[in-house]
Amino acid sequence: MLQPLVVGLGRSGSGLHLRTLARLAGRTGRTGHPLVARPPVGCDPRAGVLRLTATPGEVTVVSTLDEALDHVDPATAVVHVCTPPRLRHALIAELAGHGFRRMIVEKPLAASREEFDALMRLHGEAGLALVAVAHWTGSRLAGRLRRLVQGRQLGALRRITVDQHKPRFLRSLTTDGHQSALDVEIPHSLALALDLAGPAELRAAHCWDLRCEDRELPRLGGAHVALEHSSGVATLLRSDLGAPVRQRSVVCEFDGGTATGHFPLSEDDDHAQLVITPVGTDAPEAPAGAPATGGVPGPAREVFRDDALTDFLEGAYRGFLSEAPDAAGFSLACETARLLCTAREHCAAAPSACKGSH
């Protein structure tokens, strides 16, 4: 078994990683081959005042890495790095200095090109096993879309449009972990687009400000990113962090039709949906009995469980135990980080839009 150490107990560390680790421990424990040692250790300098989603006894909370070393052995630990991206490199260097080697790093990998380059040097020099959180690409929905692309049941893929919209006023107003909307949702959709359509070059990127009553937060209202893939596919990524409703969807346009995927909107439900609409037909209104991706698909709607983050963490832990790192996954994470750096630089060179969320 491996011992989790979650560093950073904010929304990501406490609300997502600790809760998902509990599900993973239960899932693998029932098989008789547990992956996760319990309880996990959570480390955050604000430990004394934080209100965690985990109940007492489910997590050991400490305020420093020195205290954490009293509870975990770096040789058998997996560190979940859930601090803001601007603090990543220094923290990972400190962890490496304590002997930690296995790390799961929240998106994005780095807040700038300089930090990313420094992290890659550290990765090689310290022999780190780094996994970047990219559970969208490992989801069952992404797997169905990938099979459609590779099998060409709907013909060649021509265009990808990803929409990730949600109201994020409170977190943006009360925290300062992200410098722009490019760091919030775009990393998920960018990794997905690269996974489905292959390498790409940035064609355009812009952010706009988040406005709420008398407050204005530069570049945190949302972002658009346009890509051109070497495969000929065009991608548009859209994220509105001032939207009145939530949406997490991907539309893949093929020569012979459209596949529209809907990711689960929150931890409240773990079901995804996939709607297949061949050219010249209408989208179905109800789930179809037969799988939409078998053979030549007709109009169909599938609804299926897709607990992507739990599946992702299980794959990462099994990879750590087998000492067989996912080279393809890490390469995808690096390419995602590089394109994000390019998009940040593009937006930094342009004046911040002042239109508010739209």
Image: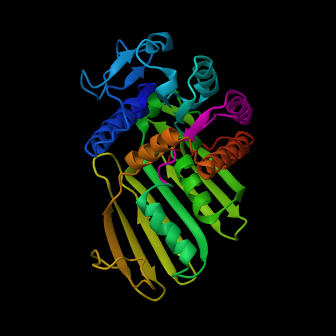
Location of residue 21 (image quadrant): top left
Location of residue 150 (image quadrant): bottom right
223 left or right of 127 in image: left
What quarter of the picture does the N terminus occupy?
A: top left
The verdict on residue 126 being magenta is: yes
Residue sitting at x 52%, y 44%? 356
20 left or right of 189 in image: left
User: How many dots with numbers?
Assistant: 0
Q: Where does the image place residue 345, in percent across and percent down from the top left? A: 73, 41
Q: Where does the image place residue 151, in percent across and percent down from the top left? A: 54, 77
Which segment is the magenta one?
108-136
Residue sitting at x 65%, y 67%? 234
Residue sitting at x 35%, y 12%? 48
**Up-down relation of residue 65 to residue 329 (above or below):** above
Residue 238 visible within the image: yes
**Up-down relation of residue 20 to residue 240 (above or below):** above
The type of colouring in the image is rainbow
Q: In the orientation shown, which residue stands out farthest toward the bottom?
A: 280
Q: Where does the image place residue 76, in percent across and percent down from the top left? A: 47, 27
Residue sitting at x 38%, y 50%? 244
Residue 243 visible within the image: no
Between 42 and 180, the residue placed more toward the observer is 42
Between 2 and 271, the residue placed more toward the observer is 2
Q: Where does the image place residue 153, in percent across and percent down from the top left? A: 51, 82
